[in-house]
Amino acid sequence: MRSRRAVVELIVAGCAAVGSVLSWLAASSQVVVAPVLEGEPSTTSVVYYAPLLTLSLLLVTASGVLGVLGVSRLRRSTPPASPGAGIAFHAPKFE
C-alpha cells in the first residue's frame, strides 16, 4: 500500500513547482528607457522584481526536496517482488 504522506508530498511538490513558474513569470516587466543621445530612438529593457525571484527560487528548492522525499517514501513503502529480485548476478563459489 502506498504511503499517504508520500502522495501528499508529491502533490505539494507539484504545486510548489507550478507556483515557482508563476512567480518567475510575474517577476519581469518591460520598461521604456530614454535615449542616450538627442534624436536616438528609445529602447525597452526588462526589469526583474527581486522578491518574486527569491520566492521562485525558494519554491523550486522546496519542490525538489519534497519530490525527492516523496519518491523515496514511495520506493520504501512497496515490498520487493521476491526475495532475490534485487540480485542480478550470482557469483560462483570456489572452494
Image (cartoon, grey):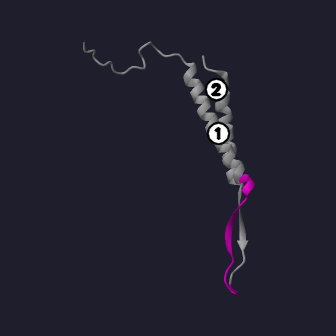
Instruction: Residue type at mark 1: give it.
Output: Ser
Q: Position of residue 23 (x, y in %)?
A: 71, 50
Q: Are marks 2 and 1 in contact (CB under 8 Å)?
A: no
Q: Position of residue 14 (x, y in %)?
A: 65, 37
Residue at mark 2: 6
Instruction: Residue type at mark 2: give it.
Output: Ala
Q: Residue furthest front?
A: 95
Q: Quadrant of residue 64?
A: top right
Q: Position of residue 27 (x, y in %)?
A: 71, 56
Q: Secondary structure at mark 2?
A: helix
On residue 91, the disc is none
Q: Does the magenta segment cover residue 47?
A: yes
Total of numbered circles in the picture? Answer: 2
Other-residue count near label 1 (Cα within 10 Å), few / some / many at <14 / 14–19 / ≥20: many
Residue 47, compared with residue 8, is above or below; it is below
Span colored in magenta: 37-52
Residue 13, compared with residue 1, is above or below; it is below
**Left or right side of 93 for 52:** right
**Left or right side of 43 for 90:** left
Residue 36, compared with residue 17, is above or below; it is below
For the point 61% across and 31% down, the residue is 69
Q: Earlier in the sequence, mark 2 or mark 1?
A: 2
On residue 63, the disc is 1
For the point 60% across and 25% down, the residue is 73
